[in-house]
Image: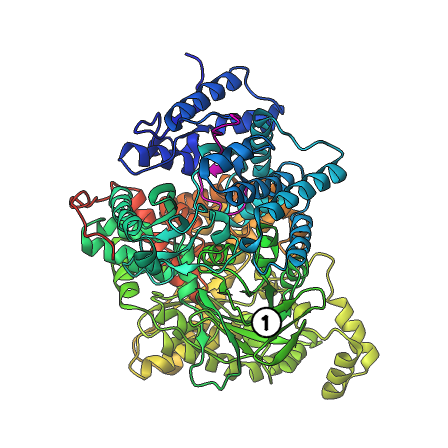
């Protein structure tokens, strides 16, 4: 059987459906599905993702494709009664991308294809509106000239602005038919001048040029950047959707808009969106005109609004998820152009999942699976302090919630460069376009003067969890001079502003923040997640505050307390440096004696915060040179404090420098050569534990030895720790304090001999950050120069420091766990690298059978949810039996 490359839809019949999403892309599969269930869709057809992959690989199409496209096009002609290229009643089509994973705005679209100097006259006669016909022609030449022929869009905008000035027209809609015809002529002449090629007049040539361009857009810079951020594989490819045009710009009985079946910012069950009367779809999405709230459609187009409300209810019940809809009304008749699962904020995702369970649309299992764990980060960061005095410059639309402060930047390239370098920047634009994506990724927040709640800036920001204020109409942006005016103030590039994504306020300067408040729906969802997960979740915390934060977010202990962070605090670093530079054991012990009470106090605070929960303390890990002075001024200051000769001190400092410190004198190797150090740290831990226990609290210390490569290293360190424990118990009296001594597995050799290490080690914790470094033989601090290229080129599927490398590092984790438990049945095993908060990595850890993951405090809720999803994905998911019952129509 010959491979099929084209699938038709519309006219009451469809050759595919949502089950073919990988082949037809999300847009094409859903157009077929809407046809199946009776939702009104213009007729059209889909070129499959197989065609895309073949085209990008061979730069040519399968032989039978042109014949299949011709046949499908004839079907559309028959259903519409129009002819493609017919000069009396022309069929016009749109050509759109549509991957299986939604990538809004990242690839290309062409509308009104099929127009030329002859068919435009036929369109004018059929519509009875010459101005409409030439407006459609102008839009087509501009889109085609930009997308297919590569002429910068701002060239067309410049020419259009000049024509508007000459015609004294304020808006595009004020231009006459003759002025628009002149714009078409000027646009075509400019295309031919820039490209050296004639603008195609044959509709068939136009169609294949557009198909080529949409397939090529799968590999454009913004699509590659979007795939990289969202971990979308390159080999998915995109489908191409060719659909009969319907027109929202045929007068006051026509319009176009975007709708969500629930509010994408809050999750409230109400039909939400924006529309424009007498407009085409790109006017809404691109922010060319300020749209109206969808509620206005009730009065402006009441019959079409009722149909839209019914279609929205039908689609949400059918897909059992919040839908993002595009629609056009042509002279009173509603057409649905797209439905897809809506991108929404974390707050909206949580609320809609919990509400849909209550409504009977989905089960609790499905509600837990419905929310992306990585989204929860949006809910857990501070917002603006409501008590702070602020100077509000302007108020726009609260397009994506949160709060962000940063330095004003007007250029996306500059935003990308400075944001990537660690600066807090706010990207300010008149309106964003897909070309701005790289700058949006790096910025703390986005401010636009134009556009609405469904503009490019709003949709992309919500998807990334970035704070965004859109459509701030009183903000007058002058990108050429690097400034904007608002509220009587002039804000220059480099000035600080603050965005309030909850209210849409644009505020001068930096504003203090407050901790977030968790909603009742959030608590409900996390309760359901906790009831379903097997894997425990701990927090990485080095201070009592971090410990309290982690516990507040549901951490069930501390999986990593890094003692070296405590050494950098004021009043301690000099004692640490004296200990390192001591020339005899007596001097070293004296310095450690000064550090002992400081470390003990640290642990007292942490043990109090974690009353009743385990606390894993890692002994000193980094190389000693990290604590030593660097510049001449610091060396002189330390020499003065210690009474040493600066030159001699400088020589001592230099002696501690290492060529490759990550593989040098660090971790257990320090403890082996400086046994006084682990003795002091163990004493601080045990003395703090006994002190807190005397306060009536339960203390569960777990002491972890880092960077073990041999079983003998661990055995000797455990002897030191056990001896100190016995000494402290003898002094404290009472019942012995239960504790564990274990190790970090962060070297491949340790994983390979895990059975021998487990003979004495009482728990393992995989330090996946270092294990990734030592497995790949690269430094995470230096790999940024090439790792993005490796991911982009498909050499690696993801950055291994963000998502666990299952094939390599994962195999070491699996083997180390298996062999360790073979030697010591019941061995407690966890992970304490930041992979413990990565949802896809958590699924692997659950499958391997780890007991817990540990991550930064703010990632604890995400890890809890990911652990629940890992459990659910390993067994059949309960479905709601009420999902097919009729739900109430949306308001």
Q: Quadrant of the C terminus?
A: bottom left
Tell me the magenta residue range.
Answer: 85-107
Residue 64 horizontal/vertical position (percent): 51, 15
Task: Please provide percent x and percent y for residue 159.
Answer: 68, 51
- For this view, does 556 lie left or right of residue 793? left
Q: Which residue is mark 1?
A: 406
Residue 341 appears left or right of 183: left
- Whether residue 635 appears in this view of the structure is yes
Q: Secondary structure at mark 1?
A: strand
Q: Residues within 10 Å of mark 1 (few under 14, many from 20)?
A: many
Residue 797 seen anywhere in this rendered image of the structure: no
- Kindly identify the residue that appears in the image at 26 percent across and 35 percent down: 37
- The mark tally for this picture is 1
- The answer to whether residue 839 is above or below residue 689 is above
Residue ID at (63%, 60%): 168
Task: Give the percent coordinates (x, y) of residue 180.
Answer: 60, 46
Q: Is residue 514 magenta?
A: no
Camera-nearest residue between 339 and 146: 146
């Amino acid at each position: 059987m010959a491979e099929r490359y084209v699938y038709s839809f519309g006219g009451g019949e469809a050759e595919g459906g949502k089950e073919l999403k990988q082949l037809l892309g999300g847009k094409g599969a859903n157009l077929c599905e809407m046809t199946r269930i009776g939702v009104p869709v213009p007729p059209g057809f889909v070129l499959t993702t197989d065609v895309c992959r073949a085209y990008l690989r061979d730069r040519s199409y399968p032989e039978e494709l042109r014949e299949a496209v011709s046949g499908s096009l004839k079907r559309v002609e028959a259903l519409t009664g129009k002819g493609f290229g017919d000069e009396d009643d022309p069929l016009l089509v749109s050509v759109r991308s549509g991957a299986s994973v939604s990538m809004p705005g990242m690839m290309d679209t062409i509308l009104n294809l099929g127009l030329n100097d002859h068919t435009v006259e036929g369109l004018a006669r059929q519509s009875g509106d010459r101005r409409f016909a030439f407006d459609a022609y102008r839009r087509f030449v501009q889109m085609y000239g930009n997308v297919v022929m590569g002429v910068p869009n701002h060239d067309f905008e410049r020419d259009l602005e000049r024509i508007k000035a000459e015609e004294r027209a304020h808006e595009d809609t004020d231009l006459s038919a003759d002025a628009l015809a002149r714009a078409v002529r000027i646009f075509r002449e400019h295309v031919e001048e820039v490209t050296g090629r004639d603008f195609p007049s044959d509709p068939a040539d136009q169609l294949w040029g557009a198909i080529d361009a949409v397939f090529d857009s799968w590999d454009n810079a913004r699509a590659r950047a979007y795939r990289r951020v969202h971990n979308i594989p390159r080999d998915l490819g995109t489908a191409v959707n060719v659909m009969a045009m319907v027109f929202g710009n045929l007068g006051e009985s026509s319009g176009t808009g975007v709708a969500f079946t629930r509010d994408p910012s809050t999750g409230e069950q109400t039909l939400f969106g924006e529309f424009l009367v007498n407009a085409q779809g790109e006017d809404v999405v691109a922010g060319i005109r300020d749209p109206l709230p969808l509620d206005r459609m009730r009065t402006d187009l009441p019959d079409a609004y009722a149909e839209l409300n019914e279609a929205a209810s039908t689609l949400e019940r059918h897909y059992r998820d919040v839908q993002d809809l595009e629609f056009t009304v042509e002279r009173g008749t509603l057409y649905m152009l797209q439905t897809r699962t809506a991108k929404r904020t974390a707050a909206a995702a949580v609320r809609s999942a919990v509400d849909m369970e209550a409504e009977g649309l989905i089960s609790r299992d499905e509600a837990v699976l419905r929310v992306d764990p990585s989204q929860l980060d949006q809910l857990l960061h501070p917002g603006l302090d409501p008590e702070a005095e602020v100077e509000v410059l302007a108020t726009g639309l609260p397009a994506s919630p949160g709060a962000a402060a940063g330095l004003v930047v007007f250029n996306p390239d500059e935003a990308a460069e400075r944001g990537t370098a660690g600066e807090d920047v706010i990207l300010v634009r008149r309106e964003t376009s897909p070309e701005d994506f790289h700058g949006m990724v790096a910025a703390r927040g986005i401010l636009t003067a134009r556009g609405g709640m469904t503009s490019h800036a709003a949709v992309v920001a919500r998807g990334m969890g970035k704070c965004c204020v859109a459509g701030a109409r009183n903000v007058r942006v002058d990108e050429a001079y690097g400034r904007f005016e608002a509220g009587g103030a002039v804000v220059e590039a480099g000035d600080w502003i603050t965005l309030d994504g909850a209210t849409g306020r644009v505020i001068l300067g930096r504003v203090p923040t407050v901790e977030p408040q968790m909603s009742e729906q959030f608590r409900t969802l996390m309760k359901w997640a906790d009831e379903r997960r097997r894997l425990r979740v701990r927090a990485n915390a080095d201070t009592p505050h971090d410990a309290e934060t982690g516990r507040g977010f549901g951490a069930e202990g501390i999986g990593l307390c890094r003692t070296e962070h405590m050494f950098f605090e004021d009043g301690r670093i000099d004692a640490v440096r004296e200990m390192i530079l001591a020339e005899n054991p007596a001097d070293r012990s004296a310095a450690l004696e000064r550090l002992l009470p400081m470390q003990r106090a640290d642990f007292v605070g942490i043990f109090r915060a974690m009353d009743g929960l385990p606390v894993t303390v890692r002994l000193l890990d980094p190389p000693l040179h990290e604590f030593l002075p660097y510049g001449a001024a610091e060396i002189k200051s330390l020499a003065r404090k210690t009474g040493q000769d600066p030159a001699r001190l400088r020589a001592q400092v230099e002696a501690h420098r290492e060529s490759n410190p990550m593989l040098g004198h660090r971790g257990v190797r320090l403890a082996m050569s400086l046994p006084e150090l682990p003795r002091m740290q163990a004493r601080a831990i045990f003395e703090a534990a006994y002190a807190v226990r005397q306060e009536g609290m339960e203390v569960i210390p777990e002491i972890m030895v880092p960077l073990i490569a041999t079983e003998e290293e661990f055995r000797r360190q455990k002897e030191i720790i056990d001896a100190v424990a016995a000494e402290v118990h003898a002094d404290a009296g009472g019942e012995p304090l239960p504790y564990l001594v274990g190790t970090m597995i962060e070297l491949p050799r340790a994983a390979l001999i895990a059975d021998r290490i487990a003979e004495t080690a009482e728990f393992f914790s995989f330090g996946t950050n270092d294990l990734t470094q030592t497995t790949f033989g690269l430094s995470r601090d230096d790999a940024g120069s090439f790792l993005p290229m490796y991911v982009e080129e498909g050499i690696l599927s993801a950055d291994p420091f963000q998502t666990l490398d299952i094939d390599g590092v994962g195999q070491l984790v699996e083997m180390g766990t298996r062999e360790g438990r073979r030697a010591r049945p019941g061995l407690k095993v966890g992970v304490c690298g930041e992979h413990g908060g990565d949802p896809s990595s958590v699924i692997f850890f659950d499958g391997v059978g780890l007991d817990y993951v540990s991550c930064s405090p703010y990632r604890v809720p995400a890890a809890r949810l990911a652990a629940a999803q890992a459990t659910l994905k390993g067994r059949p998911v309960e479905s709601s039996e009420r999902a097919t019952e009729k739900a109430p129509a949306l308001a």
